[in-house]
Amino acid sequence: MAQLGDLLKQAREAQGISLDEASRQTHIRRHLLESLENNQFKEFPSPVVARGMIRNYARFLGVDPIEALTLYDGNGRVPVKGQRLTPDGIEFMNLSMAPRAVINWELLIGVLLLLIVVGGVGYLAYYGNLVQPSVTATPTKTPMAAGITDEAALVLPTVTPLPTSTPTPVPPTATPTPVIYSGVQVELVIKQSSWVQILADDVKVFEGILQPGDSQSWSGERRVAIRAGNGGGVEVIVNGTSRGLMGAEGQVVDQIWEKVDSPAALTPQPSRPAGSQTPAATPTPNILNEPPPTQTPLPEGEATPLPLESAPENQ
């Protein structure tokens, strides 16, 4: 572990970069950079935060982040179940954007069967009461005491049956209308305070700090780009489906959810600030034995990365 600080410090001094300049460009406080170079990792609130800052600082100095993290705790890359990691450590998943069926046949058949059962029960209850015969009590002649004639005998009253109630038919239940998404709709659920910037179809529509409990959504016809200053405190919901937290606590994470014409449909792509060079892609170990994700070419005229801005130092 003692070699990590030496590796970072030698890389910084070899490039002639001061700690103040590195702090300004990485948005990491100067005393935290000094702690990294002096191997004082107790200054960080958690190992997750320390790993995120080591990755960002190593990438800034041109040091391999996997090598730096391996020197820190022996784990260069920690995969997340059900997700894949790019060489930059940004999480993404493929989301199918195939159009949903307008009519849900299973639900329609279920409603029809329910109506048939309710109608059959109502029919039997209603017509069964109509065909029931009327019951009229017939008086029986009882022996009379001596001295009582037929004229003086009491005649028993006729028993009248009680009226029957007619059941009211149950109205049919309403069939819910399925939600159909024509573009890309992203909803953010804030678990921890985080600075957030949103670009919808390459136009910035929001920038600010969201607090725990906030929930906001944005939509675009082609794509929605997100930059969060605290990836561990932001849950992403794309077209009604939760995609989990954007990253680790304290990690600055970029995601772009883009609608394409192929059935693979919606693919999050890592975004970089304008003017930065995109490094060559390095193969990622296929831990889940799944086929590699397809690269989505940028539309014509959009070769320059999206103008996502850096997160402020104090979120």
Image (cartoon, helix red, strand yellow):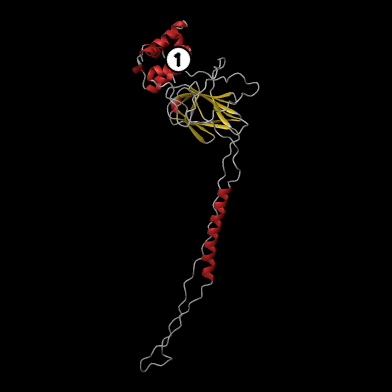
Instruction: Using the image, determine if residue 105 lies above or below residue 40.
Output: below
Q: Amino acid at mark 1?
A: Ala
Question: Splitting the image into 4 quarters, where does residue 256 fall?
Answer: top right
Furthest residue to the front? Answer: 289
Q: Where in the figure is residue 5, as x and y percent of width and height?
A: 39, 12
Q: Quadrant of residue 203?
A: top right
* Residue 47 horizontal/vertical position (percent): 37, 22
Quadrant housing the C terminus: top left
Point out residue 305 in the picture as x, y percentages from the top left corner: 58, 19
Where is residue 85 drawn, in percent x and y? 49, 25
Compared with residue 67, is residue 127 higher up or lower down, i.e. above or below? below
The single residue placed furthest to the right in the displayed view is 300
Q: Residue at x 55, y 56 (%)?
A: 115
**Looking at this view, is 211 or 292 the one in front?**
292
Judge by depth and name the residue closer to the eye, 112 or 128. 112
Q: Visible in this render: residue 171?
A: no
Nearer to me, 19 or 54:
54
**How many numbered marks does the figure carry?**
1
If the image is split into quadrants, where does the N terminus sit? top left
Q: Is residue 82 above or below residue 111?
A: above
Sort mark 1 into few (<14), some (14-19) or many (20+) by Cα contacts within 10 Å: many
* Residue at disc 1, secondary structure: helix
- The residue beneath circle 1 is 58
